[in-house]
Structure formats: structure tokens, C-alpha cells
Image (spheres, rainbow, N blue to C red):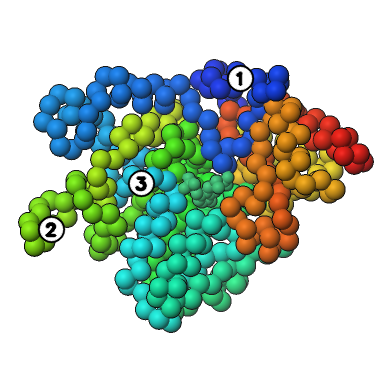
């Protein structure tokens, strides 16, 4: 029997925002795939930086500068450890979007006409648009692994698509629409067989379960701090050391250099070679504190609890007659429930739920090709969970859905 018990009653006390009343109702925050809430220890770590040791990093030879540098480097170590990487392999960026753009930009020079990049039909715009730009620049083809009828990636199709022409394979770990947890190891194996670079967008994975880059054996992995209790404007680009050593930086300026003269420059050691300019110091320290918070609870316990909560949510949504787009196999599902209510626009559902204090997302979820072309919908509703949600939150969601249906006189 899995231990899915978390002391959520106590955890909730760390999230002051959950005491807020929205339209006179208790806030039920079910928009965690968009961004997670931020607990007090993370806020405190960032405040502490500004209050007690506000200084630039890697340059100032004074007490505050040394303390700031120590904490900023320590944050990198915590994040590296969190994904079983080394410090040298862990670059801080603005977020998953910047990490993926940086990769498309840096890898572009190695591609030539006729090469192929393989993505999947369920990708977020952040893992489509940068590759489309690269394709235009280099006359390269972008191909997409199909989503099958079970809302999973069609691995047979992946086997057909990934061939000697494939130079890059970039897929999401967990779908932000379908909640499907993809078999990235399997897809990575296909990429490796043909010598292609393998990239994982773990924006919806790393916050929710233990991610081990060595186990996945990916070349690069990207995620955002703000979806895992950290602040906005900070994220991660992991790269295997041997890959990062080969790559040219994507930003040039202070801190990423070892030596500059009027003719040319030499790059700094990893990971600083990829962190030009004054970084988001407070954000990095906040992300380190977020990792501490998650590890204190334990990623396995978080996953077990979310699995239990997701199963409860699916049962309740089904009982309420709500159509959910999700992987058929419950073990392959993260805590993302994208649904539609026939006869109601998704924006109306979200607005009526907001009146009940329930925050969900409605629209195309930044995955227009999937939502419009594959699911053939203009807009959908999405409730997404994190470990501070409860079965009570799901019950409130269901009551809200029933009330919304009454407003629109839907049986
Ligand atoms: N998805 C959602 O509501 P940024 O914006 O850089 O932090 O993350 C981009 C991103 C990349 N990949 C996946 C799988 C994502 O889900 C996201 C962000 C949010 O679904 C905001 S659009």
C-alpha cells in the first residue's frame, strides 16, 4: 500500500495566499500547471538576500558580495542535486522557455539543409516555435510524433520518424494539457540510436516527481522555478558536461568570460560560461529554497499524494459527467485535468468557477496545435493540482461545475 499521506493541514500554513478569500469564498487554487504558489520559506530566503546581503555575485571582494556568491552557488548545487546532475551542468535561465530557445539557438550552427528535428504533437509552444524558427533559418524539417487515441505518444510512430536524418529530438516530460507522463527514456533511446541530441522539457515533470537526468540519459533538460514553488524569472537548463563544453554561449558579456582583450575573449568555466551579466540572484536563491522545501517533504511522497488526489478528481469528474482528456492508463497521468462541458465555452466555466473562489485555466493552454488540431477544440478548461491541494478542493470544484451547469441550464 502506497503512503500517500501528507500533513497537508500543516503544509497549507506555509502558503499565506491560501487564506485569501476570492469573491467572498475560500480560494481553491487549481491552476498549478500555470504557476505554483510560493511558501513562506521561499519568500523569506529572497527577502533575506535583499535585507541582509544584497550584493552582486562573482565580482565583489567584500563581505556581502562573498555571502551573496556563496548562497547563489549553493542554490545551483541544490538544484543540481535535485536532478542528480553536477554543478557544472546546471545553468540558471529565466525559465523553461528561455532554456529551450537557448538550445535551438546554440544547436542551430550544427544543422544543415535536409536534417530533421523531431518533436511531438502534444508540445507546448515553447518547444515548437523555437524549432520552427531554426527550421526556417537552416532549411531543416520539423516532424511531430503523433498522439494516439489513448492520449499518449505513439511510440511506433516515433520509431518510424526518428532516423539517420534526425539531429535533434525534443519532447515534453509531462503534457500540460493531457497530463500524460511520457516515456522519455524510451524516446531518448531512439534518439541515441541515431546519434541525435535528446532534449526533455520537464516544466511539468520536475515539480511533481523525482527527476534523474542520469537515469533518463538526456543530453539536456529544461524546467521553470515558478512551477515548483520558486519565484518567476528563474529556471534551469541542464546539459551533459560534454555537450555544454562543445556549445557556444548564447549571451555574451560580463561574468561569462575568463579573459577579454581587444581582439578576442575566452569563456569562463561551466556553468558560468552560460550566465552572462548580473543574474537573477534573489530568484536563484529562492529556487534553492524551493528545492529544500520539496526535498523536505520528499518527491516520492509528493508523487504518491498527487496520484491519490488525481484518482479522486477523475472519479468525481466522471461522476459529474465531465469529459476529461487524459491518458487512459492512470499510472501515466500527472495531476492535470483538461475538460470540457458541452454547451458552455471554457471561458464561461472559468469565470463562473472564479465566482466560487476556484481558480482554473481556460483556453488553448499554449498548446494550440494539440488543442485545435488534435483535440479539435477552440478552448478547454484545465484544473491542475499540487501537493497542497486536498480532496475538499476537488469537491468545491465539482460543486462549482454543477452550479455553472445550472446557470447554463445544462442537465
Ligand atoms: N505552461 C501552462 O499553463 P515558462 O513559461 O517558460 O515558465 O514555461 C513554459 C512551458 C514549457 N513547457 C511546458 C510543458 C509548459 O507547461 C510550460 C508552461 C504553462 O501550461 C504556462 S503557458
Image quadrant in which the C terminus is located = top right
Q: Looking at the image, is 172 positioned above or below residue 305?
A: below
Disc number placed over residue 248 in the picture, else none:
none
Residue 305 in the image: x percent, y percent? Answer: 60, 33
Q: Locate residue 262 relative to residue 134 in the image: left or right.
A: left
Residue 7 visible (yes or no): no
Would you identify the image quadrant in which residue 192 lies? bottom left
Closest to the observer, 135 or 398: 135
Q: Locate residue 396 relative to residue 366 in the image: left or right.
A: right
Disc number placed over residue 20 in the picture, else none:
1
Residue 353 in the image: x percent, y percent? Answer: 74, 33
SS for callout 1: loop
Would you identify the image quadrant in which residue 81 lies? top left
SS for callout 3: strand
Q: CA distance from mark 1 to mark 2?
A: 52 Å
| First along the sequence among labels 1 and 3 | 1
Which residue is at a point 14% across and 32% down the rendered structure image?
A: 60
| First along the sequence among labels 1 and 2 | 1
Tell which residue pokes out farthest to the bottom in this image. 114
| First along the sequence among labels 2 and 3 | 3
Q: CA distance from mark 1 to mark 3?
A: 31 Å
Disc 2 marks which residue? 265
Which residue is at a point 56% across and 69% down the rendered structure image?
A: 144
| Label 2 beta carbon within 8 A of ligand 1 | no
SS for callout 2: strand
Closest to the observer, 152 or 72: 72
Disc 3 marks which residue? 93
Amino acid at each position: 500500500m502506497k503512503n500517500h499521506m501528507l500533513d497537508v493541514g500543516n503544509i497549507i500554513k506555509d502558503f499565506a495566499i491560501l487564506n485569501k478569500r476570492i469573491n467572498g469564498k475560500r480560494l481553491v487554487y487549481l491552476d498549478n500547471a500555470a504557476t505554483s504558489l510560493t511558501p513562506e520559506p521561499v519568500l523569506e530566503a529572497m527577502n533575506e538576500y535583499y535585507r541582509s546581503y544584497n550584493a552582486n555575485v562573482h565580482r565583489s571582494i567584500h563581505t556581502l558580495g562573498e555571502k551573496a556568491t556563496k548562497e547563489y552557488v549553493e542554490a545551483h548545487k541544490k538544484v543540481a542535486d535535485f536532478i542528480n546532475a553536477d554543478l557544472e551542468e546546471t545553468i540558471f535561465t529565466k525559465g523553461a522557455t528561455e532554456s529551450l530557445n537557448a538550445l535551438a539557438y546554440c544547436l542551430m550552427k550544427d544543422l544543415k539543409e535536409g536534417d530533421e528535428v523531431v518533436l511531438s504533437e502534444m508540445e507546448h509552444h515553447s518547444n515548437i516555435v523555437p524549432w520552427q524558427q531554426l527550421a526556417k533559418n537552416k532549411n531543416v524539417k520539423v516532424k511531430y510524433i503523433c498522439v494516439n487515441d489513448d492520449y499518449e505518444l505513439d511510440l511506433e510512430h516515433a520509431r518510424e520518424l526518428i532516423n539517420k536524418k534526425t539531429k535533434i529530438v525534443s519532447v515534453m516530460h509531462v503534457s500540460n494539457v493531457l497530463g500524460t507522463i511520457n516515456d522519455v527514456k524510451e524516446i531518448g533511446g531512439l534518439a541515441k540510436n541515431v546519434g541525435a541530441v535528446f532534449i526533455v522539457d520537464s516544466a511539468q515533470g520536475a515539480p511533481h516527481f523525482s527527476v534523474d537526468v542520469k537515469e533518463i540519459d538526456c543530453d539536456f533538460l529544461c524546467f521553470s522555478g515558478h512551477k515548483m514553488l520558486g519565484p518567476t524569472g528563474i529556471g534551469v537548463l541542464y546539459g551533459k558536461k560534454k555537450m555544454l563544453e562543445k556549445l557556444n554561449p548564447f549571451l555574451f558579456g560580463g561574468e561569462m568570460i575568463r579573459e577579454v582583450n581587444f581582439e578576442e575573449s575566452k569563456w569562463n568555466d561551466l556553468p558560468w560560461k552560460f550566465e552572462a551579466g548580473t543574474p537573477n540572484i534573489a530568484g536563484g536563491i529562492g529556487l534553492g529554497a524551493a528545492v529544500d522545501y520539496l526535498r523536505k517533504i520528499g518527491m516520492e511522497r509528493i508523487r504518491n499524494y498527487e496520484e491519490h488526489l488525481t484518482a479522486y478528481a477523475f472519479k468525481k469528474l466522471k461522476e459529474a459527467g465531465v469529459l476529461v482528456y487524459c491518458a487512459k492508463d492512470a499510472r501515466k497521468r500527472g495531476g492535470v485535468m483538461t475538460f470540457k462541458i458541452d454547451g458552455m465555452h471554457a471561458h464561461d466555466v472559468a469565470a463562473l468557477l472564479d465566482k466560487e473562489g476556484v481558480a482554473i485555466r481556460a483556453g488553448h493552454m499554449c498548446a494550440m496545435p494539440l488543442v485545435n488540431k488534435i483535440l479539435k477544440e477552440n478552448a478547454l478548461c484545465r484544473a491542475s493540482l499540487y501537493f497542497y491541494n486536498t480532496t475538499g478542493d476537488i469537491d468545491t470544484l465539482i460543486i462549482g461545475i454543477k452550479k455553472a451547469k445550472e446557470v447554463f441550464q445544462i442537465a
